[in-house]
Amino acid sequence: MTTITLHPDFRVGAVDRRVFGSFVEHLGRCVYTGVYEPGHETADEHGFRRDVADLTKELGVTMLRYPGGNFVSNYTWEDAVGPVEQRKPFLDLAWRTVEPNLVGTDEFLQYCEREGIEPMMAVNLGTRGIDAAIGLLEYCNGEAGTKWADMRIANGRVEPYGVKLWCLGNEMDGPWQIGHKDAHEYGKLAAATGRAMRQVDPSIELVACGSSSMMMDTFGEWERTVLSYCYDVVDHISMHAYYEEMDGDRDSFLASGTAMSTFIERVAASADAIGAQKRSDKRISISFDEWNVWYLFSRFVGETNLPVQKDAPRIIEDVYSALDAVVVGDMIISLLSHADRVAVGCLAQLVNVIAPIMTEPDGPAWRQTTFHPFATAARLAQGDALQVKVDSATMPTKKHGDVPTVTAAATVDPETGALALFVTNRTAEEQVVTLRTPGAEARIDGGSAVLADHVGPREGQEAAESYGMVDALPVAHEDGAITLRLAPESWTAFHGTMRG
Ligand code: AHR
């Protein structure tokens, strides 16, 4: 028997809505024939696809990171502003693709503005440095009267964009990164760049690169060294994690959310250790600015094996299964459970590239399986995350040791009392759960679930759209106790109310 206990006074913290962010990189077909396709029947006057924008809205994306990813580490932003007909293509070495520079900073930021999405920009600390970073920041946020701000105005945009969130490079610990650096080189550069950027605009939030994954040999030491240089300058440290089912090890894959939580707790501990050493009252939070299921080792050929291509090639267009959707839901549980620490999250990426939304050039756009748990959680997770006590059995996994069979996160809106409870059942059997809410009146009014139904990747629009949320198993309220039932290998979002 599994028990979940919630208490209205025991809260983790307010859910930062930026945790429901995503990511648009100049990679494959994320930008071209993804968000942007002039000539498409739904394209707006700016060339952006309305069908994709509508799905993005339905997905509930609050924030978009741009322009990379690995791409940013060899990007010259100045080449992609100003009159489009004067822009020159360049060979992006990260993805070995000719980038036409038709979409650049202005197009992206104005798209975000029109769609009511907060942008998160990244600066190139691979091939470039402080100068390019402060120039770009001034271009985006500066008032009239200085070189780069005036260039923005000359390019037709008078009002500063007021971009708040800035990544100091991308995955600089990765040997694959163009301009890869060791932790000392990067830490010094991040601190110096961050300091200079704050002189341009003191109101920005800065993200230092953490590790590209917990499996990096430098993990831990990287965070320690980098933050020893830039702890006082930055607000967040980044985390990236991609999970996949390997060698048929379904149980380890289903436990990805637990691996993600371990990763978060280790990064937080590394950051706090530096804070303690510095006797600092400041707490560094986490920007989990790339997370998802990605069949990186089992399906991707690797960046260096890609041929040089142009015209928005199909790169990393993973097709997702129902099981992948359950794991994405479980990862959202991990993010919400750490609401006191995780300020930003980006489901990587938004369209076509390991994405919840797929498109065909000149054709339709549709939802992949992973769309559903994200959209549901983004809609329901409002207010504060609660501390959730789950008493469940454990199951052994090859990769992550013993993990709980059931995981859960809950949010309550302090204004309305709206309660959301997200629960994963990692086992192949139905689970019965007693929900206890001492000190509060609670009701569960219903729910919906995604099920890992043993059907493989849902290739193409028709197969993908045959999959969606189904009704949760019936909920019973009896003698003050609530009994929930969880379908085998499922992720369920319950909604109701809780008042203390
Ligand atoms: O999201 C795809 C790639 O994964 C990004 O470009 C990079 O940052 C990460 O390795």
Image: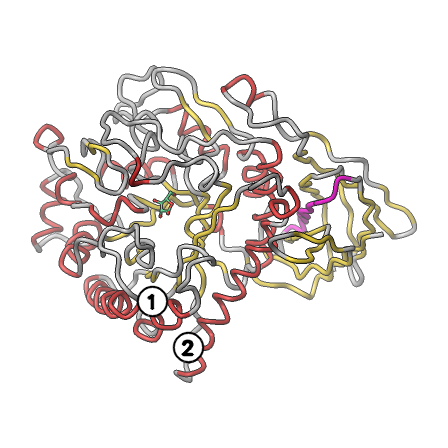
Q: Would you identify the image quadrant in which residue 143 lies? A: bottom left
Report whether 350 appears left or right of 477: left
Q: Is disc 1 placed on a helix, strand or loop?
A: loop
Residue 274, numbered label: 2
Q: Which residues are magenta?
A: 416-428
| 418 in magenta | yes
The residue that disc 1 covers is 234
Q: Nearer the viewer, residue 316 or 274?
A: 316
**Neighbours of disc 2 within 10 Å: few (<14), some (14-19), many (20+):** many
Label 2 beta carbon less than 8 Å to ligand 1: no
**Main secondary structure of the magenta stretch:** strand
| 153 in magenta | no
Q: Amino acid at mark 2?
A: Ile
- Quadrant for ligand 1 reads top left
Report whether 102 appears left or right of 23: left
Instruction: Please say if 193 is above or below 321.
Output: below
